[in-house]
Amino acid sequence: MNKSRSIKQNAVSDALPNFRNLGIVLKIILLSNVLVGFYALALANSWSNIPAILLQIFPLYTPVLLFSLLLLWVIQPQLSQLSYRYGVLTVNGLVLLFMLMTYFLGGDLYHPLGKDDNLFDVIRYSLLSAMMCNVVLIYFRLRNQVLSRALHDARLQALRARIRPHFLFNTLNMVLAIIRNQPKQAETALEDMADLFRSAMNETADLVPLMAEITLSKQYLALEQLRLCERLQVNWRNEGVPDTTLIPPLLLQPLLENAVYHGIEPLVAGGIIDITLRDQGETFQIQVNNTCSPQQHFPHSGNKMALQNIRERLILLFDVEAHYEVERGKDFYRVTITLPYGH
């Protein structure tokens, strides 16, 4: 129950691609097929000759690609422990091994009868396999370097988006309103506000423990409850998710801020925010459900900006393996984020 589990995220700059990420695997297959297509085009004498060349290439290319991806999926935890240089050598060695096994076990399919000297084909296929493998690895290395800069920019943008001027002004006004009659409560509110901003500004990691994100969110909600009093009710429910689970920072707090400002605050009688953390075996789910006005048919533009920011960060970190869903009912607004667990 308390075992630490890490989210399976995309590779960072100067690291091998995550061969257990479905989006990355699909990109490898697509890029490899594009390279094969260019190779067939270079060998062909005419357009009509291309299909015949592809039929000669695919019997060797396909099993090498699929078996290599399968083995890389199996040994992904070990690959992640290697330096980039040794990781590249390992991947190249495995691809070369599968190519040689397929070639020599393929019999007449790859070295027809009457052809005694197969050295040329072995060298040619080895060089082509190494070339294709390294082109794919170089592509992902360049892609990861670009994503690293994008993640940095997105993180800064997210931090700026979280610390909204109206939140600061509202909190200060709330403190000024209670400072004479409830000085101890006002002092606590100022301390919580300072901790909240300090945590938000100092966080630079791609992943943080779930408990840290929950603590930050509870500090934020405590400040809002001082302002809204009994109009704001909050229910937390944890269904088997360890506190040490690693998630992206500032993922939960923006959802709660939207729930407060665009759901609860416009209601005269206030409302309820339900936060559910759910372990679904292979996935970890965050769900924020809040009451809202039936007349509010579309989210506020500020709501759209913050939620779009979260969507972009999830795409950058997890590609197609993260799911983001919004459901709008007559009197509720629900956001559900599903993230993959690592193995």
Image: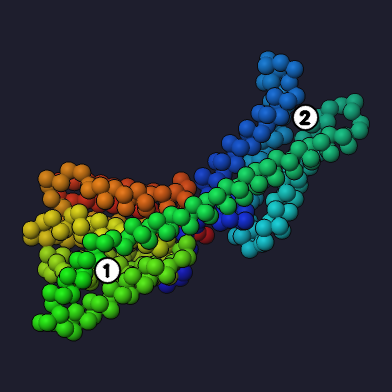
The label number, if any, that marks residue 147 in the structure image: none
Label 1 environment density (alpha carbons within 10 Å; few <14, some 14–19, many ≥20): many
Label 2 environment density (alpha carbons within 10 Å; few <14, some 14–19, many ≥20): some
> Horizontal placement of 268 versus 219: left or right?
left
Which residue corresponds to the image point at 53% horizontal and 55% vertical from the top-left? Answer: 148
Q: How is the image coloured?
A: rainbow
Identify whether 292 is placed above or below 202.
above
Residue 309 location, x and y as percent? Answer: 37, 51
Q: Residue furthest left?
A: 268
> Horizontal placement of 259 versus 86: left or right?
left
Q: Which residue is mark 2?
A: 109
State the SS at label 1: helix
Which residue corresponds to the image point at 22% horizontal and 66% vertical from the top-left? Answer: 169
Mark 1 and mark 2: span between their CA atoms? 67 Å
> Horizontal placement of 291 versus 308: left or right?
left
State the SS at label 2: helix
Contact between marks 1 and 2 (CB within 8 A): the answer is: no
Residue 110 location, x and y as percent? Answer: 79, 31
- Identity, as a three-letter code, of the amino acid under mark 2: Leu
Residue 5 visible somewhere in the drawing? no
Residue 231 location, x and y as percent? Answer: 12, 64
Q: Which residue is mark 1?
A: 220
Which quadrant holds residue 107? Answer: top right
Which residue corresponds to the image point at 70% horizontal and 24% vertical from the top-left? Answer: 41
Tell me the quarter of the image containing the N terminus.
bottom left
Residue 45 location, x and y as percent? Answer: 75, 17
- Identity, as a three-letter code, of the amino acid under mark 1: Tyr
Q: How many marks?
A: 2
